[in-house]
Image (cartoon, grey):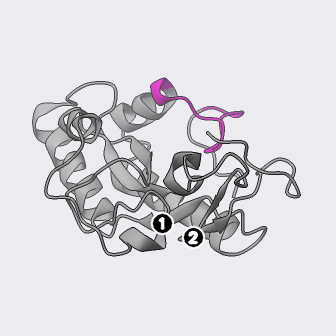
Amino acid sequence: MNEEIRGPHTHLEEATIVELQAAMTSGELTAHRLAQMYIERISALDRQGPSIKSILEINPEALEIARTLDEERHARGPRGPLHGIPVLLKDSIATADQMQTTAGSLALLGSRPPRDAFVTHRLREAGAVILGKANLSEWANFRSTASSSGWSGRGGQGRNSYVLDRTPCGS
């Protein structure tokens, strides 16, 4: 997936927030389409293809949230530079929505916190689209001094997206 965003050399995987905002301001792109493009890319690289196991789940509300933010942009303008920008959160950051927060552990499978973490709340206020939860070393690697980097019970062994036989080495 090498979809162009704005200009002849800007592609989805290289686009900056400034370029994405310019494309949304010009009407060339919508937050809904951008979220859809990233979901397709996650499917192609994470679920199929090289299967890097970097994403634990996609927010089932992401596309609807993006559509609502597009309507808001049209009616009142953007809230700021993050308006409509998809963001992934590590699975250790609480979200009070349909997604789980497990720190990568099967022990917390099904856990849904009663409220957003402060950073999640601020991202939502700024108009970011919480696209999903990213895999991480289980318990943020606080389970053992000899634990494998990038492995979680929930997501398995994450892979380095540039060198597939290497660990992702944290964030």
| Point 35% across, 56% down: residue | 32
Splitting the image into 4 quarters, where does residue 49 fall?
bottom right
Q: Main secondary structure of the magenta part?
A: loop
According to the image, label 2 marks what residue? 153
Label 2: few (<14), some or many (≥20) within 10 Å?
A: some
Q: Nearer the viewer, residue 25 or 88?
A: 88
- Quarter of the image for residue 44 reads bottom right
Q: Which residues are magenta?
A: 7-18
- Three-letter code, disc 1: Ser
Q: Which mark is residue 105?
A: 1
Q: Amino acid at mark 2?
A: Gly
Q: Is residue 53 above or below residue 137?
A: below
Dot 2 and dot 1 residues touching (CB under 8 Å)? yes
Q: Is residue 33 magenta?
A: no
Q: CA distance from mark 2 to mark 1?
A: 5 Å
Q: Residue furthest left?
A: 75
Q: Quadrant of the C terminus?
A: top right
